[in-house]
């Protein structure tokens, strides 16, 4: 009770929850991470409350587990690793602080979802950089902090994108702003001086934001982000490029990245495309059968002083590049699925049910980074793995997303499953936890959730050693989400 | 000018490092991008043009004194002018002049290199840089029917120079030159054993006083013989007569031509015609003193002034020698006009050519280093696919020949006059 | 304090006697670079760094660098890595420091054409890398200091903006892999390199150690030495080889098909910045940044005298608010789009391309070289006076750069009026528009002073100091001199969430024995 009283003093009674139903809800997610019930869930509404919470946690040695997105969660990073933890649910910090059309930047709190964000940007003539059809409850800040890839590699200059600056309260309780937001001056003064918190680097000789991003809440709690946006296109031309094999599409993908052609650029297999585009589970199988095995989705957006010309030359060049690779970009597939419909689906969050759950009710993901040219061997390995473990290859979704201007590629396998089928779930668990097979082939698990954490830090002890040192700097008492990653 | 007079340049050298590289506009890639032999070999920054500015600044501001190490830095430099030209693609500065002043300062202060002292003793005693007997100087011309201009008058003097006169393997260069000139109908003569050093190499070694007497003596001999045109095969001599004599106030009232200039002229005039094919893939090495250092001396006597606040100008305006007007075209025109010769260029050519390694006294003071530089150049030459490297200076040919002999490379080394003769 | 003989022998055993030197004349070469006095706030008459290195070493491989660091830790010596030396941050700044001249580590390990990645060692110059990359239809990010500078140093350890930043970003953003010898001698291979030996991503697993390695500015060797890095490459629309005509000192490029070089002008900064918003939104240039009149004039002339004569004609002043642009298309359609956009933007913003200026010999060509790889910068920025420094730089929005430009002019004016710096129309250089300005615009109020003139140098020192204060009080933001080194941190950190305190912790944790020179970074906690 003492803990609840103290928390109540900090953020008010209505924002402190410790009923069993709530605690149960925060104790588990869709991952294979072992459930651990928190002792309390708090919902701060402003940064000073977050700072006070962290101060209290340091004084009492209480672990804090930050959460931005609404349920369901999939990665296990928001499940406490130890007992007695307090979950800091940031969903009430959901203000869109600023949208700056001129500088193509917005500032948002962690509770803002993609649906809310897109609507706010749209009013100002901007558009968001989207991960692949996020679930409706997904926090924009959460997605960007997790380094989820966006569908437009041309605009993905750095793994950090589209994250720019942030306000973070580090584990030591210090409120900090990164990049050009750091100072001098308050935010209001900076805005007065025509600054918009768009330079992510620094301040000075440290990129603090890089230490926070990808840390799964182990360094501090982010209370706002400034994020890159793109100008809403005045026109957009989209294409679907069908192929029997992944290999057939790579030449075109690499060419597009090498000469900076197009905006969207991603590969989906028929299963994933069907899941995204089908209205419901019954439509998934039908649509999937009508789709080619793999589809490259590409688009060219027109904006600026001559949008029509921008689209026109890109479309022409894309067609030439496709032809050189023996491919034909189509406005619609023979089954009737149009590229514009796919573009529309990719421009917003997922309808319900979440597309990953549409086929069988549940889904577990395996994802990592490699380079575009190496993707086929991983796709083959995934299907070989599935076969060896008796998992149906028909239930595997494939998503290949070029990242960082095409210098790397996010590879994602979505294992569709029925959570009530224990035998199937055991196979899925086996596949997820046996990801070492991919790591041994050169896959880089840059976002090591759950069991992958042990795997990657065992492979690279030096990095683990130095990350532990970093942890002592920003969270010396180890109160931020302990037990995740390598600390 | 004394070393201290170059202090402004020392301070204003920002350390851009262009003195180490081939001009970027010429697109040097990973290979053969370095232009300075000294830092290419020794690697420490002090062995570059900028580095010598900085150590000299330390010296003139009493931060350092003479040490064995600093003398090593000062004398491990071919004085090839590469840093001078590459600096001056960007700056209004005079690295070569500072380097000359630095060596002169060393000599004045008695900070000498033993090997060079031996050379200088030889020069003083025997009027040559080869530590050979003056009496043997004319041996190269034995048997040649050529006018002796110490005995009779003539308008065209062929000046063999120390290296070609005494180096038995190179004497053919002078003999061939005479033969070719005569075939072209030139009434050419020589000084034979009475020829004396031009004084240029000693000047670049820091012994700037010697050139005074040699230039005076040579000028008197030229005048006495009624010479109107001097033709040289040695690029160092060419540089001395054309540039250094002018610089020290003894501008010759005589046309100074390198053999390549004269041959190119004779070809244009139709006096030399090639009738034989010389089937050979060649590359051409620009001698430093013929190329970037070979352009006319431009006298200037004035002061620095400032305009627009701090813009550094000169009063009267100073024209910098930037290597633009060196002798680059003539040898190439000759090679292109020889039937059968296929010329392929190296990466480092013309004003950004890489030195042969023999200059600045290095061939005497550190032959190993000198040869290392030559080998670097030979490596570059071989990448062109050439069977032969052609040059136009005895010092270059000597050093390259020694390098090839040591490495066993099949690359042939020719003076350009040898190919000319084969084609006639 | 000279090295003990024991320490010297230990170092000599690692690199060999030919690759170590204590010779004072050699050390002078590692203690001098332009702008030392304003950067170090040292006396005007002191041309050298306050502390000279005790020795200079030329390591030849990563293992040697590791071994050197272990010796440093054992004998209480500091090291300072030195790339191509174009910045005071390259030089040793503390007593008892040895310089590691990385010149012998000069290999391009790999250019991965398919994945657009180059792996390089420290002494690969920007210009060299550019030439090797265009053979494969790619180009690296290039920095303002030009083609002689170390690409690795800029990316991993120093600064990082340049004329092509509009399409190639800031150095710090291009890193895909790092091999890092820490001050302790330990070897850290970041990201995918540590996991599988592949060079495609340096972030993670989990938090990114890139954030510790460097920020907006690099650590200048204070956290160890970077021995190999992988960087992102960008599209090159031109041929596989550069062609030029002419001889020293001006070489005119043969501008490739489907590329163009323009110097565009406006009547004010406001108009020019308005155009910059349009240019970046349209994504229509290969390269583009602000062209200061005197600087551009110097680049296109062969000597100061020629520049002065050009200046007297008034052509440059007429184009004082200029922005150099290179267009480059991979197809006829792309270049046509770019040309059309440029024309439209000039019309909408009242801009022009001055025919008289374009007719000046080398004008178009020097603009091309500059944008290609920072070429001609030495003519532009050093030939006039010998050195420069900056007043209140900053990086945020284009509008902020405009604000900062006016501030810079105000700060510099009293000195320029007194004739202490080169008298320009407006000296504010930059507008490096990172990533189509989506992560900011860099501006540098740049003043050219004569380091041989004590009064000019004293003015440079004073304005350098005052500018840090002005950046704070006027709120223009923190640019590069405000962001680097203990002295600047002491002034700026209290106005920027005390970032300095974390940096000091980083220094302590990553370099427990201070075996890397803290100059240019910070002392440990």
Image: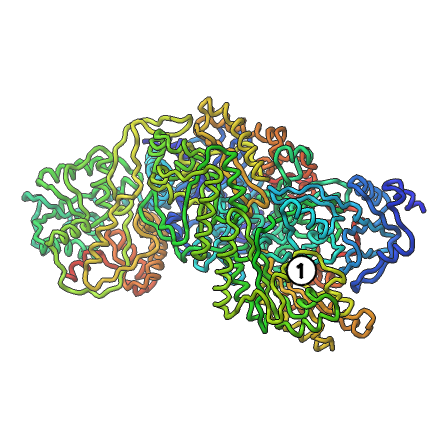
Q: Please, is residue C199 above or below residue C449 in the view?
A: below
Where is residue C5 drawn, in percent x and y?
Answer: 56, 45
Residue that badge 1 annotates: A345
Q: Nearer the viewer, residue A280 or C469?
A: A280
Number of callouts in the render? 1
Q: Nearer the viewer, residue B275 or A324?
A: A324
Q: Please, is residue C477 above or below residue A330 in the view?
A: above
Give the farthest residue toward the left: B152
Q: Please, is residue A436 above or below residue C80 in the view?
A: below
Q: Is residue B334 visible?
A: yes
Where is residue C205 drawn, in percent x and y?
Answer: 68, 57
Where is residue B230 drawn, in percent x and y?
Answer: 15, 44
| Chain letter, disc 1 residue | A
Residue sitting at x 22%, y 58%: B336
Where is residue B208 drawn, in percent x and y?
Answer: 27, 36
Q: Secondary structure at mark 1?
A: helix
On the picture, is A151 further left or further right than C460? right
On the picture, is B381 further left or further right than B244? right
Residue sitting at x 35%, y 46%: C252
Give the farthest residue toward the right: A1
Q: How is the image coloured?
A: rainbow
Give the farthest residue toward the top: C418
Q: Nearer the viewer, residue C390 or A326?
A: A326
Image quarter of the C terminus of chain C: top right
Image quarter of the N terminus of chain C: top right
- Quadrant hosting residue B416: bottom left
On the picture, is A89 further left or further right than B362? right
């Amino acid at each position: 009770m003492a803990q609840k009283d103290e928390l109540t003093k900090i953020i008010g009674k209505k924002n402190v929850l410790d009923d069993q139903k709530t605690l149960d809800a925060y104790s588990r997610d869709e991952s294979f991470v072992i459930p651990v019930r928190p002792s309390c869930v708090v919902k701060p509404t402003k940064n000073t409350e977050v700072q006070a919470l962290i101060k209290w946690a340091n004084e009492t040695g209480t672990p804090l587990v930050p959460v931005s997105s609404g349920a369901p969660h999939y990665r296990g990073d928001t499940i406490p690793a130890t007992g007695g933890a307090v979950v800091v649910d940031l969903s009430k910090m959901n203000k869109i602080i600023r949208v700056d059309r001129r500088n193509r930047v917005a500032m948002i709190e962690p509770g803002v979802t993609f649906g809310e964000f897109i609507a706010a940007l749209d009013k100002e003539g901007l558009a968001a950089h989207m991960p692949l059809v996020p679930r409706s409850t997904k926090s924009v800040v959460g997605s960007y902090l997790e380094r989820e890839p966006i569908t437009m590699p041309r605009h993905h200059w750095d793994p950090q994108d589209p994250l720019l600056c942030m306000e973070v309260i580090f584990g030591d309780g210090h409120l900090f702003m990164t990049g050009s937001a750091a100072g001098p001056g308050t935010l209001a003064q900076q805005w007065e001086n025509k600054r918009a918190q768009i330079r992510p680097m620094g301040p000075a000789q440290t990129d603090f934001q890089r230490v926070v991003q990808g840390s799964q809440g182990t360094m501090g709690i982010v209370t706002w982000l400034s994020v890159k946006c793109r100008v809403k296109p005045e026109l957009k031309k989209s294409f679907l490029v069908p192929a029997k094999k992944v290999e057939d599409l790579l030449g075109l993908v690499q060419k597009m990245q090498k000469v900076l052609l197009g905006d969207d650029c991603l590969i989906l297999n028929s299963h994933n495309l069907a899941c995204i585009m089908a209205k419901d589970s019954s439509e998934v199988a039908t649509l999937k059968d009508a789709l080619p095995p793999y589809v490259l989705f590409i688009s060219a957006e027109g904006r600026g002083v001559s949008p029509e010309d921008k689209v026109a030359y890109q479309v022409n060049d894309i067609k030439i590049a496709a032809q050189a690779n023996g491919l034909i970009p189509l406005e619609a597939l023979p089954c009737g699925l149009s590229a514009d419909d796919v573009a529309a689906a990719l421009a917003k969050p997922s309808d319900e049910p979440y597309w990953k759950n549409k086929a069988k009710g549940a889904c577990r993901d395996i994802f990592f980074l490699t380079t575009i040219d190496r993707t086929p061997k991983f796709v083959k390995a995934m299907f070989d793995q599935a076969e060896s473990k008796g998992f149906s290859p028909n239930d595997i979704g494939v998503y290949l997303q070029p990242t960082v201007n095409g210098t790397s590629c996010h590879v994602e396998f979505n294992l569709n499953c029925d959570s009530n089928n224990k035998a199937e779930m055991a196979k899925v668990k086996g596949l997820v936890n046996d990801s070492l097979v991919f790591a041994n082939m050169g896959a880089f698990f840059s976002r090591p959730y759950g069991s992958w954490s042990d795997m990657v830090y065992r492979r690279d002890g030096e990095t683990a050693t130095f990350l532990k040192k970093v942890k002592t700097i920003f969270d010396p008492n180890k109160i931020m989400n302990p037990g995740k990653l390598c600390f | 000018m004394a070393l201290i007079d170059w202090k402004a340049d020392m301070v204003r050298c920002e350390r851009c490092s262009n003195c180490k590289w081939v001009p970027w506009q010429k697109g040097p890639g990973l290979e053969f991008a370095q232009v300075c032999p000294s830092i290419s070999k020794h690697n420490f920054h002090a062995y570059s043009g900028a580095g010598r500015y900085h150590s000299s600044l330390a010296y003139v501001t009493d931060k350092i004194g003479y040490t064995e190490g600093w003398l090593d830095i000062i004398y491990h430099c071919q004085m090839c002018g590469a840093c001078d030209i590459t600096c001056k693609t960007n700056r209004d500065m005079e690295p070569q002049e500072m380097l000359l002043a630095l060596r002169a300062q060393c000599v004045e202060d008695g900070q000498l290199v033993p090997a060079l002292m031996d050379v200088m003793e030889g020069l003083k005693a025997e009027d040559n840089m080869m530590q050979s007997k003056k009496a043997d100087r004319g041996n190269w011309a034995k048997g040649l029917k050529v006018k002796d201009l110490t005995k009779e008058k003539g308008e065209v003097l062929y000046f063999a120079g120390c290296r070609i006169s005494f180096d038995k393997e190179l004497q053919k260069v002078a003999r061939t030159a005479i033969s070719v000139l005569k075939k072209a109908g030139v009434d050419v003569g020589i000084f034979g054993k009475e020829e004396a050093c031009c004084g240029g190499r000693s000047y670049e070694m820091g012994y700037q006083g010697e050139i005074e007497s040699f230039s005076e003596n040579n000028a008197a001999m030229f005048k006495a013989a009624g010479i109107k045109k001097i033709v040289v095969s040695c690029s160092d001599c060419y540089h001395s007569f054309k540039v250094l004599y002018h610089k020290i106030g003894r501008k010759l009232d005589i046309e100074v031509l390198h053999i390549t200039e004269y041959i190119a002229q004779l070809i244009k005039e139709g006096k030399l015609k090639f009738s034989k094919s010389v089937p050979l893939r060649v590359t051409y090495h620009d001698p430093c003193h013929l190329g970037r250092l070979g352009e006319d001396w431009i006298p200037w006597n004035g002061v620095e002034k400032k305009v627009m606040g701090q813009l550094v100008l000169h009063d009267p305006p100073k024209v910098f020698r930037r290597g633009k007007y060196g002798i680059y075209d003539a040898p190439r025109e000759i090679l292109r006009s020889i039937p059968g010769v296929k010329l392929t260029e190296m990466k480092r050519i013309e004003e950004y050519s890489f030195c042969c390694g023999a200059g600045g006294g290095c061939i005497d003071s550190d032959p190993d280093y000198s040869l290392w530089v030559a080998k670097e150049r030979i490596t570059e030459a071989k990448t062109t696919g050439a069977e032969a490297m052609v040059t136009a200076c005895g010092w270059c040919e000597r050093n390259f020949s020694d390098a090839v002999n040591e490495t066993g490379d099949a690359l042939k080394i020719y003076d350009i006059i040898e190919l000319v003769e084969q084609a006639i | 304090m000279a090295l003990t003989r024991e320490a010297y022998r230990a170092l000599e055993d690692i690199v060999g006697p030919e690759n170590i030197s204590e010779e004072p004349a050699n050390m002078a070469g590692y203690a001098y670079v332009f702008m030392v006095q304003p950067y170090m706030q040292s006396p005007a008459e002191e041309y050298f760094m306050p502390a000279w290195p005790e020795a200079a070493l030329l390591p030849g491989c990563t293992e040697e660098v590791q071994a050197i660091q272990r010796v440093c830790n054992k004998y209480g010596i500091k090291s300072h890595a030195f790339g191509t030396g174009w910045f005071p941050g390259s030089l040793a700044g503390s007593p008892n420091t040895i310089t590691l001249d990385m010149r012998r580590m000069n290999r391009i390990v790999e250019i991965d054409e398919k994945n657009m990645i180059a792996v390089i060692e420290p002494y690969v110059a920007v210009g060299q890398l550019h030439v090797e990359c265009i053979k494969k239809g790619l180009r690296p990010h290039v920095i303002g200091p030009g083609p002689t500078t170390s690409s690795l140093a800029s990316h991993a350890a120093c600064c990082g903006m340049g004329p092509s930043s509009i399409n190639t970003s800031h150095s710090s953003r291009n890193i895909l892999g790092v091999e890092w010898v820490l001050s302790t001698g330990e070897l850290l291979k970041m990201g995918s390199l540590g996991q599988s030996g592949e060079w495609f991503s340096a972030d993670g697993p989990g938090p990114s150690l890139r954030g510790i390695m460097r920020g907006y500015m690099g650590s200048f060797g204070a956290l160890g030495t970077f021995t190999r890095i992988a960087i992102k490459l960008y599209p090159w629309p031109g041929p596989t080889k550069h062609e030029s005509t002419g001889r020293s000192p001006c070489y005119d490029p043969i501008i490739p098909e489907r590329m163009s070089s323009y110097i565009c002008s406006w009547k004010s900064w406001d108009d020019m910045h308005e155009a910059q918003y349009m240019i970046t939104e349209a994504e229509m240039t290969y390269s583009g940044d602000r062209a200061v009149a005197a600087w551009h004039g110097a680049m296109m002339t062969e000597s100061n005298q020629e520049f002065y004569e050009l200046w007297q004609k008034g052509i440059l002043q007429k184009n004082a608010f200029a922005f150099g642009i290179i267009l480059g298309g991979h197809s006829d359609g792309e270049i046509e789009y770019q040309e059309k956009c440029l024309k439209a933007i000039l019309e909408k913003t009242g801009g022009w391309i001055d025919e008289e200026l374009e007719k000046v010999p080398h004008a178009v060509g020097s603009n091309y070289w500059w944008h290609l790889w920072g070429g001609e910068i030495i003519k532009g920025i050093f030939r006039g006076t010998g050195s420069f420094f900056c007043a209140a730089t900053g990086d945020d929005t284009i509008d902020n750069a405009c604000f900062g430009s006016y501030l810079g002019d105000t700060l510099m004016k009293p000195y320029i009026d007194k004739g202490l710096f080169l008298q320009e129309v407006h000296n504010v250089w930059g507008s490096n528009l990172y990533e189509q300005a989506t992560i900011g615009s860099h501006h540098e109020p740049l003043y050219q002073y004569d380091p041989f003139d004590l009064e000019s140098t004293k003015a440079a020192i004073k304005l350098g100091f005052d500018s840090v204060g002005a950046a704070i009080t006027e709120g223009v933001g923190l640019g590069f001199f405000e962001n680097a080194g203990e002295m600047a941190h002491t002034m700026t950190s209290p106005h920027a969430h005390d970032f300095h305190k974390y940096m000091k912790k980083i220094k302590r944790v990553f370099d427990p024995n201070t075996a890397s020179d803290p100059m240019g970074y910070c002392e440990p906690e």
